[in-house]
Image (cartoon, helix red, strand yellow):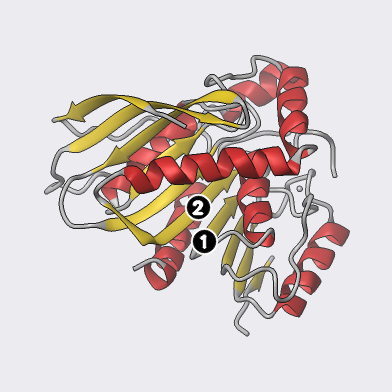
Amino acid sequence: MKKLLIILPAIMLLWSCGSSTSNTQVETTIEKPEDVAEVAPSNASELITEEISYEADGVTMKGFIAYKEGEKKPGVLVVHEWWGHNEHARNKAKALAELGYVAIAVDMYGDGKQAAHPNDAGKFAGMVMKNIDGAKARFESALVELKKNPNVDSEKIGAIGFCFGGSVVMTMANMGMDLDAVAAFHSGVALPVMPKKDKLKTPILVCNGADDPFVKEEQKVTFKKMMDDSGVEYKYIDYPGAVHAFTNPGADAMGEKFSLPLAYNKEADEQSWNEMKIFFEKYLN
């Protein structure tokens, strides 16, 4: 088994950190989103984005799909931070589309709900993660919507998540969902459902900050031991100097506003995104 150990619990920041309709938009000028480290290829074709609504767990969900038309491509689900379905998740979906994937920014809270305060974020995330069957239903409904896109190769599906979203995508994999690869960024590793042999089948990449106070050392040890025992390939990276929310350029402002240890780290953001690209190239392409 291959794994790399390079050098979140926590409080509720952690694991916290039907029919459909769509509104399609074609972006003829590709610009780098403010909070995405990726640079769009100079020969990029038109990027298409769609606002979608779908039903899950008795709730109307509002998602966002980004893709380029052409031959069938792997699909990737993007799960937001505990703040909710925001521009950070949408920009990551766009960045994935630039790499040749069809990506859906998932709504795990319903009605595109976003939190304006950590107390609300913790409440929203807790409601989802304490009802893991409901969380799975919401994730599965987003997967159905993703596979409806005619550009998706339904046999090649991955997922990425940030903070709360990282915990979600790893938990879905640990529950045995049919995913080909999962990547979690600044995510908790004390999960509602932990990895177990013969249940987990999905290779997992974890990209965390070495100085993230929400991920305790004993949690890392337990997680890695359970991943080892599962027999599934994984890679766990701790980026020196990086704290929680290091992929989000808006993290510093939120950290200062609410006195939370959040900070954007450009180097860790770019390096972790590149790790994901390599990981997905191996397991999704």
- Residue 1, image x, y percentages: 63, 85
Q: Secondary structure at mark 1?
A: loop
Toward the viewer: 4 or 106?
106
Check the image and name the residue furthest to the right.
218
Tags 2 and 1 in contact by the CB under 8 Å rule?
Answer: yes
How crowded is the residue under tag 2: few (<14 C-alpha within 10 Å), some, or many (20+)? Answer: many
- Residue 27, image x, y percentages: 19, 29
Is 162 left, or right, of 9 in this rendering? left
Q: Earlier in the sequence, mark 2 or mark 1?
A: 2
Task: Evaluate whether residue 40 shows in this view.
Answer: yes
Is 135 left, or right, of 220 in this rendering? left
- Residue topped by disc 1: 179
Give above or below for 112 relative to 74. Answer: above
Classify the position of the C terminus by image quarter.
Answer: bottom left
State the CA–CA distance, disc 2 to disc 1. 7 Å
Task: Evaluate whether residue 17 shows in this view.
Answer: no
Is 256 left, or right, of 52 in this rendering? right
Toward the viewer: 234 or 156?
156
Q: Residue at x 64, y 45 (%)?
A: 136
- Residue 109, image x, y percentages: 62, 27
Is 106 left, or right, of 187 in this rendering? left
- Residue 258, image x, y percentages: 73, 19
